[in-house]
Image (cartoon, grey):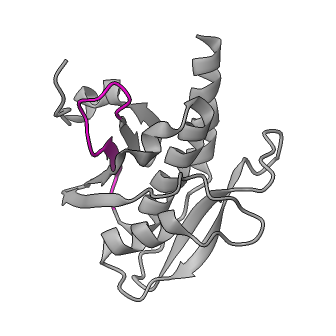
């Protein structure tokens, strides 16, 4: 219980570092954990590196380039090899990012950090209020379904409050 609460607080702090968005379709802030990861760092455990994005609206290609690297000096890539975005769906102020199941191999804090990096990158790329991350196979026990707003960290359990329904069987 305490471990879960600490993870939730950490990811909340991580998400708050991604403020001030500029949607110019020519650049994007790619977020990564600092190397080495230091949880007592004043600026948090993640930072950003601005990347040029030639096709600013080809979100799937940009996010796949981000997931696959290379990672700039001073940062580490939090995503397992082979991680890929399957689809990016925009619906009003919501962006649903479907990723392959490689990310489900991460556990606890590694997953939280990877999700925080990916969500902050999406918020810097796409002008939306909510990012929904889901794994390609939402029916497995290790599936990912998380809802994040640009003001707070939310889990899939809070999706109903946002009027977003989960497409999984209980």
- The tally of labels here is 0
User: Residue at horizontal 48%, vertical 55%?
Assistant: 118
Asked if the stretch drawn in magenta spans residue 141, the answer is yes
Report whether 81 appears left or right of 133.
right
Decide: is 29 above or below 145: below
Question: What residue range appears in magenta?
Answer: 128-143
Image quadrant in which you'd find residue 155: top left
Q: Nearer the viewer, residue 120 or 87?
A: 87
User: Residue at horizontal 44%, vertical 56%?
Assistant: 83
Q: Nearer the viewer, residue 122 or 37?
A: 37
Residue extending farthest to the bottom is 54
User: Residue at horizontal 49%, vertical 38%?
Assistant: 105
Image quadrant in which you'd find residue 76: bottom right
**Rendered location of residue 19, percent (x, y):** 55, 58
Query: Is any part of residue 101 visible from this angle?
Result: yes
Q: Main secondary structure of the magenta part?
A: loop
Query: Is any part of residue 21 visible from this angle?
Result: no
User: Residue at horizontal 23%, vertical 27%?
Assistant: 160
Decide: is 16 above or below 157: below
């Amino acid at each position: 219980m305490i471990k879960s609460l600490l993870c939730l607080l950490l990811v909340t702090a991580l998400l708050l570092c991604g403020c001030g968005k500029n949607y110019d379709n020519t650049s994007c802030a790619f977020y990564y954990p600092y190397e080495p990861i230091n949880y007592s760092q004043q600026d948090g455990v993640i930072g950003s590196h601005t990347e040029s994005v030639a096709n600013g609206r080809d979100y799937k290609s940009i996010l796949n380039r981000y997931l696959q690297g290379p990672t700039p000096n001073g940062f580490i890539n939090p995503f397992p090899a082979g991680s890929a975005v399957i689809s990016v769906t925009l619906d009003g102020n919501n962006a649903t990012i479907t990723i392959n199941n490689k990310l489900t191999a991460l556990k606890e804090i590694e997953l939280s950090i990877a999700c925080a990096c990916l969500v902050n990158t999406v918020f810097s790329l796409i002008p939306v209020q909510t990012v929904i991350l889901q794994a390609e196979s939402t029916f497995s026990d290790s599936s990912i379904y998380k809802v994040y707003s640009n003001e707070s960290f939310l889990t899939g359990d809070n999706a109903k409050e946002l009027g977003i329904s989960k497409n999984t069987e209980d």
